[in-house]
Image (cartoon, rainbow, N blue to C red):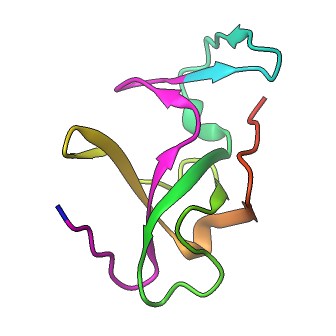
Amino acid sequence: MQLTTIYDNIIFKFVEAATSTRFINNASSGLIITSDDNNQTAIARWGQVVAIGPDCINVKPEDYILIEPGKWTSGFYINNSRYWKTDESMVIAISDEPGQTY
């Protein structure tokens, strides 16, 4: 399936593994960090860009982006892969390597 994005929308995958309700946080040492925080969307998260809309200026496919806390949609599936959407205005930082949340 070909994915075409419109306006300044960004389709991305989170760098961290995610279940249907929670992020699985790994420290750079490899330790899994558990959290009893019920609102894991209160932390900015890193994602890798899959597709961008034609109005995106600074972000390009395959960039790693740091997204403002909670400024993404619920996940959706295409061909058994899970994706999320955000807008370019919600991007805090851009990198060519994945960042660490913890």
Image check: 77 left or right of 23?
Answer: left
| Image quadrant in which the C terminus is located | top right
Q: Residue at x 69, y 12 (%)?
A: 33
Image check: 41 left or right of 51?
Answer: right
Question: Over which residues does the magenta segment extend?
Answer: 2-23
- Can you say whether 35 is above or below 99 in the image? above
Q: Residue at x 71, y 46 (%)?
A: 98
Nearest the eye: 86 or 3: 3
Q: Quadrant of residue 4?
A: bottom left
Nearest the eye: 5 or 1: 1
List the single residue furthest toward the right: 29
Q: Position of residue 81 (x, y in %)?
A: 29, 41
Q: Residue at x 53, y 84 (%)?
A: 56
Residue 74 shows up from this direction: no
Q: Position of residue 53 (x, y in %)?
A: 41, 81
Q: Residue at x 57, y 30 (%)?
A: 40
Q: Quadrant of residue 16?
A: top right
Q: Position of residue 67 (x, y in %)?
A: 63, 56
- Can you say whether 94 is above or below 33 in the image? below
- Can you say whether 92 is above or below 80 in the image? below
Residue 99 inside the magenta-drawn segment: no
Image check: 61 left or right of 84?
Answer: right
Residue 20 inside the magenta-drawn segment: yes
Residue 46 shows up from this direction: yes
